[in-house]
Amino acid sequence: MNTRRLTTRGVLHALAGAIVWCGASVLNGGGGHGRCAAGDDLPRKNEEAPVTHEHTNRLINSTSPYLLQHAHNPVGWNEWGSEGLELAKREDKPIFLSIGYAACHWCHVMEHESFENEEVAALLNAHFVSIKVDREERPDIDAIYMAYTQALTQGGGWPMSVWLTPEGKPFHAGTYFPKEQFMHTLRGIATAWEKERERITQAAEGADRFFSQWASGTPPAEGALPLKLVDEAASTMAGYFDTRLGGISGGGTNKFPPTMAMDLLLRVHHRTKDAGLRDAVTVTLDHMARGGIYDQIGGGICRYSTDREWLVPHFEKMLYDQATVSSIYLDAYQAAREPLYAATAADIFDYVLTDLRAPDGAFYSSRDADSEGGEGAFYIWTAAQVHSILGEADGRLFCAYYDVTESGNWFERFGHAPPGPKNILHVETPPEEFAAREGLDLQQFAKRLAEWRKKMSAKRAQRPPPGLDDKILTSWNGLMVASLAKGARVLDEPKYATAAVSAAEFILTHLRKDGRLLRTHRQGKSRLAGYLDDYAFFVHGLLNLYEATFDPKWLNEAVALTEKLIEYYHDEKNGAFFFTASDAEKLVARSKDPRDGAIPAGNSVQAANLLRLAILLNRRDYRAKAESIFRALGTDAARMPSAYESLLCAADFHHSRVKEIAIIGDPESPDTAALLRCVYERYLPNKVVVHAPGPVEDAAMPLLKGKTRVNGRATAYVCEQYNCKLPVTSVEDLARQLDAR
């Protein structure tokens, strides 16, 4: 018997026979985001228009905005659950599983082309049990079938289209399918199900073997990821960056904000002083902040750019992008003291607080890419519109600064341009150079820019807005709490801490049951057991919130949730954490979902959390749990560092001489505030900070125990492994200790 492990290539070979009868390889079919030109200028249906509907399916009872978008399709959709799965078994039909999310442009296109079409619906209803999943509510399902789709097609994206046996085992997959190809595929699979069932069975068995390998991962490494690997990975990744425009295009044209890679590069630069690492980050952040991917009028970052110049984005605004991108701008501001970075982070925060904040303080999930008129209609301008709002003189300057022309700057070469001359605002010339060229005082020009933006924003607000996904996700709120809390300290802006506190209070009040986190909340209903990333990201937010407020409540809550995570998710045998709880719904595989994607991997974030908690509370067991993550994932991280950037960041913390900073002083006094500003104006990625107003003898945190003010003044203690330097009371002395190597 051949006992070798089945490789991905072997799985693909095992599945190959099941692809032929679909009529065309999925590699030539579903393209995911932007790979197909079909339907580029199709408007999304107006969700508010008809009061009555010809069709209503079972999704009408869902709380997910994405599922509700499909509640009036003629397709007989089911939510994921026992009802749909049992129906497939009872009727002996294959399952068509469609996974997407509310702000996904290509999901809207496939819905309009296929799922609203009576002919397509008739095929699906006759031969399949159709199940629709919101990937943001059920990332466990999405991760499983995305892994299969990527193994089968060498690509992935949303909408994801997967065909399953009634037992949930996949046998074919793709992403976006144009209508005619989709119908051809449906007919081919329906025929094979009736006449060639054995081939489908073989493909499903191959998927079983794939999942067995995927879930088990690679053998654990012997120790934590070595610092040498961290440095080598940073150097390699810096080589992938576009030296002229920043970002990583990966051989294509799309550029996503590479936040996790930039985090790693800044950390290693801080330690090694390798200028190339820093430059890769600053060039990227400069061009993102001035590009079309950034909303120059209202703030906020779009999901990704469809071109290498950062000009034409897919216009959806995801909460997690606002969180992670604002955070890296804060880091870069600390490292480079570039005002543009502070302003960009603040603009993102203000956008979130204005547009994505629920009345009760938590944060909504996203704004759509589409509104009436098609994708990006809310954001684009003509020169005539600008002049009508600002007048001829100011309009001329505005158009020159933001590259607004009569012919437009969004051209067909970008693949999904709307008809007619349209402009996406972006900045080609930095403001200081533009002001000098136009003979303007820079400060006066900045003031006029702010006034123009305000007028343009007021006019834009009269347009039909893109759709809002108003569900509240624990994990994404955790990321936003973390960045806002950090921003409160770095930007010295208390309103961001206040917002972070409100969101954290909401999660703890409405999304926690019996001490355990829930995943999602909408319209008064909280549901679904939390996943690893819900715990990891929210604990990360709570730890940052402690540093923003120094209220011990947040640290205590972080510990309580960490204990629940260990109890229900930790793999005691092989280390690291599973993505789902031990008592969660059993799917075809239970994995640790260890790789970074659009958001950092939960295991990587939790490794950093555990290391911080280990120092704050002197918990060696927490440090051991973090090291178990490095061992469990280290082999894969060494082989594919670009998929484990956030784990490498945690490893950098692990190997670092972490600065343990204690501030003792009245929280309202100017001298305490001055010491804290001295700490947070510096880029110190590997640090913990604690505070107490006065002497603490029985402190739960060893960094506070026995520490007092010197001569009645606010006092700072800088320590490493609990060994402290002489206490200091002046900003100058503290700066010298913090800057010492």
Image (spheres, grey):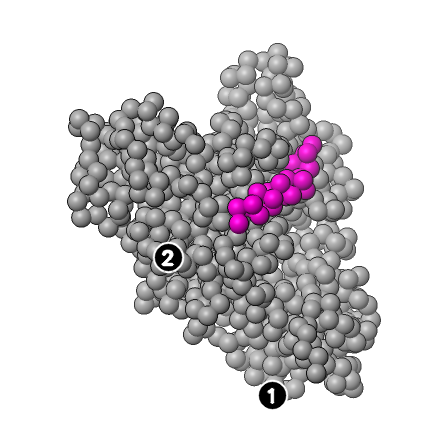
- Residue 402 drawn in magenta: no
The quadrant of the picture occupied by the C terminus is: top left
Residue 191: image x %, image y %?
A: 78, 81
Which residue appears at 73% of the width and 34% of the height? 408
Which residue appears at 32% of the width and 38% of the height? 719
Residue 365 as seen in the image, left or right of residue 217? left
Residue 200 as seen in the image, left or right of residue 524? right
**In the displayed structure, would residue 63 be above or below residue 94?**
above
- Whole-angstrom CA distance, mark 2 to mark 1, is 48 Å
- Residue annotated with mark 2: 622
Q: Residues within 10 Å of mark 1 (few under 14, many from 20)?
A: few
- Residue 235 drawn in magenta: yes
Q: Earlier in the sequence, mark 2 or mark 1?
A: 1
Which residue appears at 71% of the width and 47% of the height? 250
**In the displayed structure, would residue 46 be above or below residue 94?**
above
Q: Which amino acid, by three-letter code, is at mark 2?
A: Tyr
Residue 526: image x %, image y %?
A: 40, 64
Residue 134: image x %, image y %?
A: 55, 64
Q: Which amino acid, by three-letter code, is at mark 1?
A: Arg
Which secondary structure, mark 1? helix
Dividing the picture into quadrants, the one containing residue 265 is top right
Q: Nearer the viewer, residue 62 or 721?
A: 721
Which residue appears at 61% of the width and 77% of the height? 168
The answer, for residue 354, to whether it is visible in the render is no
Q: Nearer the viewer, residue 484 or 127?
A: 484
The quadrant of the picture occupied by the N terminus is: bottom right
Can you name the residue that lies furthest to the top here? Answer: 439
Tell me the magenta residue range.
226-247
Dividing the picture into quadrants, the one containing residue 51 is bottom right
Q: Nearer the viewer, residue 28 or 442?
A: 28
